[in-house]
Image: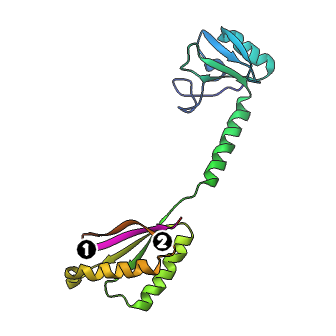
């Protein structure tokens, strides 16, 4: 019943089905609005039935032989589809990657403060990247950085699990922590 302007193939968007006059197949299998099989008929007959019911003819399975078309209210169908997509989007959890920088020569109290902040991130469900940048002569003492990483991990042992172990990359050492399940 609605006139849609579309692209060369007649689709308004690539993944949308053909509706009403866009269906060019000579024969189609028709499904009624309640899901009942109405049989195989010409697309003109099917369109006529849809018009009499005040509904749209929608090609729901174009690859079938013959293609399957359903008589339905296409506007209502699209509305319901969009509603479901929004609901699914609302329910998904987006995990962000936070970063906390440490120093190879960090003091114990400073480390406790940073651990407290990382604990908040983990409790919020975020991943945390812990990194240490080595400067100058510190680069020859990466073992000191590994000790700092291990001490930091011990402080967060109750709420953090290691996703990626401490690893050197250039002048930095990093590890990734995730919340414990």
- Mark 2 surroundings within 10 Å by alpha-carbon count, few (fewer than 14), some (14 through 19), many (20 or more): many
Left or right: 61 as drawn, with respect to 110: right
What residue is at 60 percent from the left and 27 percent from the top?
17
The nearer-to-camera label among 1 and 2 is 2
Per the image, label 1 sits on a secondary structure element best described as: loop
* Quarter occupied by residue 79: top right
Q: Quadrant of the C terminus?
A: bottom right
What residue is at 61 percent from the left and 51 percent from the top?
89
Q: Is residue 174 magenta?
A: yes
Q: CA separation, marks 1 and 2?
A: 25 Å
* Quarter occupied by residue 40: top right
Tag 1 residue: 171
- Residue 160 on image: x %, y %: 48, 71
- Residue 106 on image: x %, y %: 36, 87
- Mark 1 surroundings within 10 Å by alpha-carbon count, few (fewer than 14), some (14 through 19), many (20 or more): few
Q: Taken as a whole, is the magenta stretch helix, strand or loop?
A: strand
Tag 2 residue: 160
- Residue 53 on image: x %, y %: 80, 20
Magenta-highlighted residues: 171-180
Q: Is residue 33 magenta?
A: no
What residue is at 32 percent from the left and 88 percent from the top?
105
- Residue 119 on image: x %, y %: 52, 76
Q: Residue furthest right?
A: 53
Q: Count the marks: how many?
A: 2
What residue is at 66 percent from the left and 39 percent from the top?
81
User: Which one is nearer the viewer's eye here, 160 or 75?
Assistant: 160
Q: Earlier in the sequence, mark 1 or mark 2?
A: 2
User: Which one is nearer the viewer's eye here, 148 or 18?
Assistant: 148
The reply to whether dot 1 and dot 2 touch (C-beta < 8 Å) is: no
User: Which one is nearer the viewer's eye here, 52 or 133?
Assistant: 133
* Quarter occupied by residue 36: top right
């Amino acid at each position: 019943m609605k006139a849609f302007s579309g692209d060369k193939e007649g689709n308004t968007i690539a993944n949308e089905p053909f509706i009403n006059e866009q269906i060019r197949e000579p024969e189609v299998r028709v499904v009624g609005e309640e899901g009942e099989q109405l049989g195989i008929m010409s697309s003109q007959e099917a369109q006529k039935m849809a018009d009499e019911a005040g509904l749209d003819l929608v090609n729901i399975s174009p690859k079938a032989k013959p293609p399957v078309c359903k008589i339905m209210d296409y506007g209502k169908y699209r509305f319901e589809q969009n509603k479901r997509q929004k609901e699914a989007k609302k329910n998904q959890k987006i995990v962000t990657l936070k970063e906390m920088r440490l120093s190879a020569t960090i003091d114990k109290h400073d480390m406790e403060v940073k651990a407290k902040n990382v604990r908040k991130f983990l409790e919020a469900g975020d991943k945390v990247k812990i990194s240490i940048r080595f400067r100058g002569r510190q680069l020859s003492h990466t073992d000191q950085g590994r000790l700092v990483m291990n001490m930091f991990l011990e402080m967060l042992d109750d709420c953090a699990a290691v996703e990626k172990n401490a690893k050197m990359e250039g002048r930095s050492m990093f590890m990734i922590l995730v919340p414990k399940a």
